[in-house]
Structure formats: structure tokens, C-alpha cells
Amino acid sequence: MNTRKTPLVKGFRQSAPYLNAHVGKTMVIMVGGEAIADPNFANIVSDIALLHSLGIHIVMVYGARPQITALLQQQHYDSPYHKGIRITDEHSLELAKQAAGQVQLDITAHFSMGLNNTPMAGSQINVISGNFIIAQPLGIDEGIDFCHSGKIRRINSNAITSQLEQGSIVLLGPIASSVTGECFNLTSEEIATQVAIRLRADKLIGFCSEQGVVDSNNDIISELLPHEAEQALQQLIDNDNQQSGTGRFLRGAIAACRAGIPRSHLLSYKQDGALIQELFSLDGIGTQIVMSSAEKIRRADINDIGGILDLIQPLESEGILVRRSREQLEREITLFSVIELDNLIIGCAALYPYPDEKMAEMACVAIHPDFRDGDRGVLLLNKLCQQAREADLDKIFVLTTRSVHWFREQGFYECDIEQLPLLKKDLYNYQRRSKILITPTS
């Protein structure tokens, strides 16, 4: 019998926890005019439609900067910027309304006729736009009159929520009216950020040309805390690149995060499937701005039994770990620590104390295969050493058949059975011939 799992089966199984976690949640997705003009935009719409079909509440906020600029250039009309915001005079406003209206129609068309040749063919999606945003003028800054460039005065969050609960996608654009009936040109990043905050959304998602924030080696940074995101934004400012899609989104994500939005995701609009990979895979694909690290080490509890079993059973089958029943795990669960990522258990280890000899055993060490390239084993070891010190234990020992070199690299040295605690010495399995290694906790 062929027991080999195909990539499709493996990926689908790994996505199951995320499918359950995202159902009924609210996501605000910011799509700039650059993304809408990209050939991959049709695929983004299909992926958003897929999220909607899974029971996720979607607010889509679109921009139209390049479309407005194109109309202005066609008429050889100058519309300067001040502090990154377009100065929208009467003529610029008319062109902005024209561009935003055309973009709205294009997006709505993508959600209807455009789905016929996609995996979402046959689905019925209501896309609702309306006067959910009330604007006010930005006014004058440093002697510069912003004219019809505006900012948010009020958001009718109850009306948006009502539409979401009725199964509609809410579509919001950059043109909003004021209480006096005037129209104003707003930035899409302000709308997306403030709507996410007012709705208490679970996620703010943005698209730019890059697949997130990159480090000095041009590698994607998978996770940023707010202060780290500020440093990344400052680097863009220093390079005179703060008005890039990345810079605009970072400003919004930092504000959203500090206002209580758990996670904001930055993705590339050029890569097909980026949204799905980010939301439904173990390690994502873009950059997350998070209130606190998405990955944490903590003491295990009874709800972690299933996740621990999933980790250790393949290693037990290979003879790397000694078998433990569910009943044994339930009895010993307080001795375990786990690494949790997005509500998934990706690492575990147990600390069995022998207080009479002031020693402890580190056992049942397991890291998910997809996450063994990092230093998670070291993090678990450090955590257990800390726990041992707090319990006034001087040494930690391990019994291993496969990982002798790794433990040596961490400062362990080999010893003989006589150095084990008396109870452990009596239980030593001579058939396994495990190597015994030991290290001080300090």
C-alpha cells in the first residue's frame, strides 16, 4: 500500500487549523491602484472570493493613485504632493472621481463575470459600496491648502457590519463625501487602517510590489513588532521611499497594531496565490506586523495533548523517542513545554525533576519537520534550563540515540550510568543503549 502523502494532501491537512481559525473573522484588505493595474489582479480577486466563500467577512479598500495620475498626465495637468498627500484642487477632484469610479466598476466586474473562468465559477457574491465614510477637509498645513484632499471624520461601522453579516463584500474607495455634500479625496491606507480599527478586525492585509519587508540580505522578514516596523519605515524615509506601497502600508499597520489589531500582513500583488499561502500555510510567505510574537514558548496544558502526539508519534515509530500513551501524557502534561505558532504546536520538550539529586531529565524533545532549520531546539533547552534553575536544580541530563552531536554543541558532555539519579538508573533500558549526556543549568 502506498502511504506517501502528495503535496496536495499534506498542504490541505496543514491548512485545516487555519480554515477553522478564520471562519467568521473580519479581514480588511487594502489594494492599491498599482495592484489593480497588475495582470495578477484577477487572481487576487479570485482568492478574495475564495476567502468569502469560506465564511470570512471581507472589507476591500481600493486606491487609485496611478489611475488618477494617468488622467492628470493625459491632460497635462499638474497635481503636486505635500507630505505624501496629493493636493486635490477642483479639476484634480473631478479626475480623481472619474478614476475611482472606473476602478470601482472594474473591481465589481471582476467579482461577477470575471469569476466564470476561475475555481469560483458559479458563486454569487454581493459587492456593496455606499456612503459608509464621512469625510472632512485636511485644511491648510504650513501654508499649503490641501483643497479637496480629506481625512475621515466618521465611519458608519454598524452599517458595514450589517452588510458583512448579510454575506456581502464591502467595497470602499478613496472618494468620500462630507456632511455638507462636498467630495474629498482620501488615502486608501487611512481608510483601510481606520476601518480595521473601528470594526475591530482580526486582520489588516495590504499588497505592494515586494513580498513584504526585506532585510539587508534582501530576504523577507517574516515578523515585525511595532517598534521594529517603525525602524523599517524609518529606513524607507531615509532612502526617500516612504511613499512606496510598503511605506504607506507600514504606517497603517503600525497604527492598527497599536490600536489592537492582532496582525497585519504585507504581500506582493505580483505573486499568484500569495494571499492563500500567507493565510493557510504554517510559515506564511510575507511580512506580519504583530502586537506580540506569533510564536511563543509556554507551559503545556491538557488542550495540547493532540498537538504533542502529532509531533512525537512519527519519532516514536522510528524508535527515536520512547513511546508514550495519551494517558501517560495526560498525567505528565504539567512537565511539558511547547512552542506554539498560530495555535499550532510545532515543538515540545519535557523536564522530569529529580530533586533529591538536584537534577532533571530533558526528554521527549520534538520539533515539527518544517521548522527544524531554526534554533527552536535551543530555545526549548534554554527554557527548560530556566525552569530547572527556578526549581533549584543544578544539572540537566538527556538520554539519546540519535542527537549526541547536537547536545554536545549545546554544551552537554557524555557520562556513564553511575551519574544518573538512582530512580532513573533503575529504569535505564540497556537494549536501547542510549547515550547519556549532562550539562549544568547555569
Image: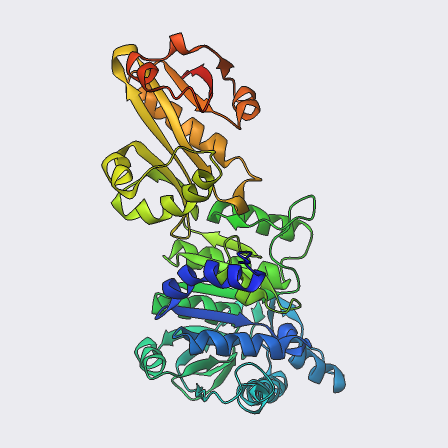
Residue 399 in picture, x, y percent from top left: 43, 22
Q: Closer to the camera, 133 or 87?
A: 133
Q: Residue at x 35, y 83 (%)?
A: 163
Asked if 36 appears above or below 384 in the picture, the reply is below
Relative to 382, say whether 246 is above or below: below
Q: Quadrant of residue 45?
A: bottom right
Residue 314 placement (x, y as % from top left): 46, 44
- Compared across the picture, whether 283 is left or right of 73 comes to left
| Lateral position of residue 74 relative to residue 384, left or right | right
Asked which quadrant contains residue 5, the reply is: bottom right
Q: In this figure, which colouring scheme has been used for the structure?
A: rainbow
Q: Nearer the viewer, residue 299 or 70?
A: 299
* Horizontal relation, residue 114 to residue 401: left or right: right
Vertical comparison of 403 with 47: above or below:
above
Residue drawn at (63%, 62%), measured in percent from left and top? 243
Q: Residue 157 location in percent, x, y? A: 33, 76
Q: Is residue 409 visible?
A: yes
Which residue sits furthest top? 418
Q: Could you say where residue 359 lies in the image, as x and y percent from the top left?
A: 33, 15
